[in-house]
Image: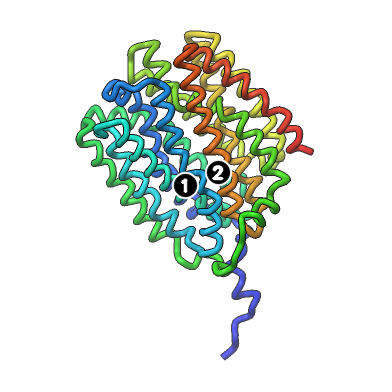
Amino acid sequence: MTMPDKTTAQASEFPTPEFQTYRVTTIAFAHFVHDLYTSFLAPLLPLIIEKLALTLSQAGLLSMVMQIPSLANPFIGLFADNKGLARWLVILAPTLTAIPMSVIGIAPSYGMLLVLVFVAGISVSLFHVPAPVTVARYSGKFKGRGMSFFMTGGELARTMGPILAVAAVSVLGLARFHFILALALATSVLLFITLEPTQEPLKAKRRGSLTQAYKEVRHILNPLAGILSARAMMHGSMGMFLTVYVEQATGSLWLGGTALTLYEATGVAGILSAGTLSDRLGRQRVLFWALTVAPVSILLFALTSGWIQVLWLLITGFTVLSTTPVMLALVQENARENPAAANGLFMMISFAVRSLAVVAAGAIADVFGMNMMFIVSALAGFTAIPFLIKLKK
């Protein structure tokens, strides 16, 4: 019997140059389902605020608590790299996230609500750290396109989530809202069937470290950290408080959900185009364009009204949300030896700065009003420009 060639045996370690549309799309669909559940927090927030008599600062803290587990993202990534368990993390996370998010509406107290969103946050990290690495492996040389597909799933969830959440709670009521858990269970089964065990890299028993992962990507991770920090107030204030802002201005929860849906819908268009364009035009160029337009559009959104304000809302969604797949592609292109750990570092920074920004935005809104919150968010967004220049160099 002829022994298999060593090169052939190790071939599955390396990404294929082809773009595997079916597998990438399946993971993107799982991202859609997973983030559908986490997107329920913002549209249900007005009901939760009324039920538990919360302040906006307390409401903002919910998002921060959900982000706290992201501090462990690098360790989750290192675990996935060293043990080769990325497949199981991706499979189980949609269901694990759906369980607590399906019962947030019936939480009897603010303390229990904090516990539920914290548990959901753990599962969010278990999904978001290994999933982009798996997508990159199946995207070949088109990592920007792969990340666009992946992030489109998440943004579609946040686009449809507000309307679906309001519709579901209108039909089922908060007491039976947990029936929506069935979709997550079916998605986990689909992932189990689609993502075969043979997808795991053969180097599963190696011993990487966070220090090695950081050294490998620090030349891009450091400026990206500055960019993420500058973007956080824009991203957090619009994503968390837009529904509340519109509901308070119009008295309609449906209009609040519709506004968030429009914001996320243009975000889908931005995400789907940005990653693909960055494959052709360059990552830094696409980032620079998006992050210089975004703060201008938020500033004008805060200072206008009527249909002009709606126009600036659409532009804001397109630019603010389009940057993530480009940054994910940058990280994966530079993280050859420790892809999940490097992605964990990136995601930790992203989630941590956004959670702090949401709390800060809520505090500003409590004291100075929501319009001032959006203005401050826009001014913070302009601080991304020096880091964009550094990244380009």
Placement of 305 over or under 320, stated as above or below:
above
Q: Marks 1 and 2, how far apart in space?
A: 8 Å
Q: Residues within 10 Å of mark 2 (few under 14, many from 20)?
A: many
Residue 82's tag is none
Question: Residue at 35% of width from left, 28% of height from top?
Answer: 163
Residue that badge 2 annotates: 347
- The foreground one among 88 and 147 is 88
Q: Mark 1–mark 2 contact, CB under 8 Å?
A: yes
Where disc 2 sits, the SS reads helix
Identify the residue at horizontal 49%, vertical 47% (top origin): 128
Q: Residue at x 25, y 40 (%)?
A: 178
173 vs 171, nearest the viewer:
173
Residue at the outermost right position: 393
Horizontal and vertical percent for residue 181?
Answer: 28, 44
Quarter where residue 231 is shown: top right
**Residue type indicated by callout 1:** Ser
Residue type, mark 2 in image? Met
Reply above or below: 391 against 3.
above
Tell me what residue is drawn at x 55 percent, y 57 percent: 78
